[in-house]
Image (spheres, grey):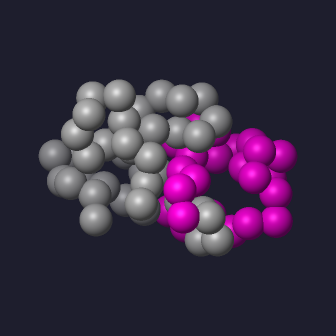
Amino acid sequence: MATKGVRGDDSFWCNCCFHDIYGPRFHCTVCNDFDLCLMCNVTAEDMHPCHDLQVVEQKHGEKPV
């Protein structure tokens, strides 16, 4: 289960900057609840080493699975 956003809906927030994620999110394939936004993904190797991140594209208004 991914981390919920501050809006209280099915949005996601970044585990690095703690902002809601809009657009692509980078989800850890090892951890159950770790996501990064596009901007923080550039520091993924420092922030979350040794784990692969998978890009999850979401269309505007689409609820995450």
Residue 34, percent across and down?
A: 57, 53
Q: Residue at x 26, y 34 (%)?
A: 8
Query: Seen in the image, is 3 located left or right of residue 49?
Result: left
Q: Residue furthest left?
A: 61
Residue 20, percent across and down?
A: 41, 33
- Quadrant where the N terminus lies? bottom left
Residue 21 at least partly seen: no
Identify the image quadrant of residue 18: top right
Query: Seen in the image, is 6 located left or right of residue 43?
Result: left
Identify the image quadrant of residue 2: bottom left
Quick check: is 19 in the magenta stretch? Answer: no
Q: Residue at x 36, y 36 (%)?
A: 5
Identify the image quadrant of residue 6: top left
Query: Seen in the image, is 52 located left or right of residue 3?
Result: right
Near-viewer residue (32 or 12) = 32
Query: Seen in the image, is 48 located left or right of residue 11?
Result: right
Residue 25 at least partly seen: yes
> Residue 16, relative to residue 41: is it above or below?
above
Residue 32, percent across and down?
A: 54, 64
| Callout count | 0
Q: Residue at x 64, y 71 (%)?
A: 30
Q: Which residues are magenta?
A: 32-55
> Residue 45, relative to residue 51: is it above or below?
above
- Quadrant where the C terminus lies? bottom left
